[in-house]
Image (cartoon, coloured by chain):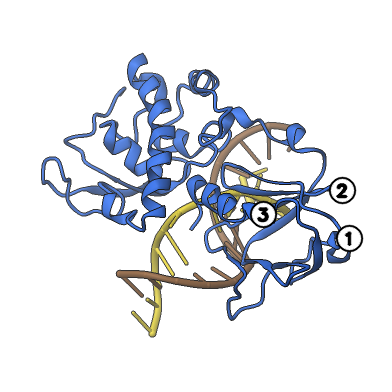
Chain colours: A blue, B yellow, C brown
Amino acid sequence: MPEGPSIVIMKEQAAGFVGRTIANASGNSKTVDFASLEGQPILGLHSWGKHFLIELPRQVLRIHLLMFGSYRINERKDTDPRLSLGFEDGEEFNFYTCSVKPLEGGLDEVYDWRADVMADAWSPALALRKLRAAPDKLACDALLDQNIFAGVGNIIKNEVLFRLRIHPLSPVGALPAPKLRALVKDARDYSFLFKEWKLAYELKKHWQAHTRRVCPRCDIPFSKGHLGATKRRSFYCEKCQKRYGN
DNA sequence: TGGAATGTTGGAAC
DNA sequence: CGTTCCAACATTCC
């Protein structure tokens, strides 16, 4: 469910709730004071990376879908929602198996929008600076670093590395400058492709590396392993993807 | 059918 | 005290 592009889609699908007032709130969340939500209008819906943010007059609710989270608009699942927001006309916005956390402080104090690969404010220059400040960080770990590439998840990681022919174990400091710039650019570009493909229900069709067994470029078997400090699944081609450094 | 996975946190261990 | 590691969370798919 949840890499950055999916959260942007969620925000767009829920846009109709902006300006509406929460009539009733309930759920099995232990961190939310449901009564305090009632009567508050939704001032805005935002996303930062994989965070979904509900802006209210007195607080911001941060929803994180983690690995298994899901949501429904004007529908319910069979299981109990973690958070259910009901509106005057009977419409509802339900969240399941997610982390819900009221944020301290305003949105702009908590979030640097320049780090969100899907944001208008995305700053490639800032990402490059962070990468240069951590030259030993492996490419597979750098892409998953939410402080650098907020919104990039494991699928996007595998696809971007394959598209750029970068071996996941390459330290970012070993990448030639144009390659490093390409990494920053493609993290964003591929995220937008991901969004379009997901909306068209054809995401998996476009996966070239993630969960694939054979390299579509050279036909040899993909390598796979839980690489880097993050130990997330990597699918890569030893022949097509160059290992910089070492 | 059991195991693993589009993810993060919080606390133990060192 | 900083860093690292691992369990926990709890659903869906293969």
* Residue that mark 2 sits on: A58
Tags 1 and 2 touching, CB below 8 Å: yes
The answer to whether residue A44 is left or right of residue A56 is left
* Residue that mark 1 sits on: A36
Q: Earlier in the sequence, mark 1 or mark 2?
A: 1
- Residue A176 visible to an observer of this rendering: no
- Work out whether A22 lies above or below A130: below
Q: Residues within 10 Å of mark 2 (few under 14, many from 20)?
A: few
* Residue that mark 3 sits on: A63
Q: Which residue is pictured at 61% across the width and 67% down the height?
A: A97
Which is more foreground, mark 2 or mark 3?
A: 2
Q: How many numbered marks, from 0 up?
A: 3
Under mark 1, the amino acid is: Ser
Q: Earlier in the sequence, mark 2 or mark 3?
A: 2
- Chain where mark 1 sits: A
Give me the C-alpha separation between circle 1 and circle 2.
9 Å
Q: Which residue is pictured at 39% across the width and 47% down the height?
A: A196
- Chain where mark 3 sits: A
Q: Which residue is pictured at 16% across the width and 36% down the height?
A: A239
Quadrant in which residue A101 is drawn: bottom right
Residue A129, x across and y down, in percent: 53, 18
Q: Are marks 2 and 3 on the same chain?
A: yes
Q: Which residue is pictured at 68% across the width and 68% down the height?
A: A92
Quadrant in which residue A33 is drawn: bottom right
Q: Nearer the viewer, residue A240 or A55?
A: A55
Mark 1 secondary-structure assignment: helix
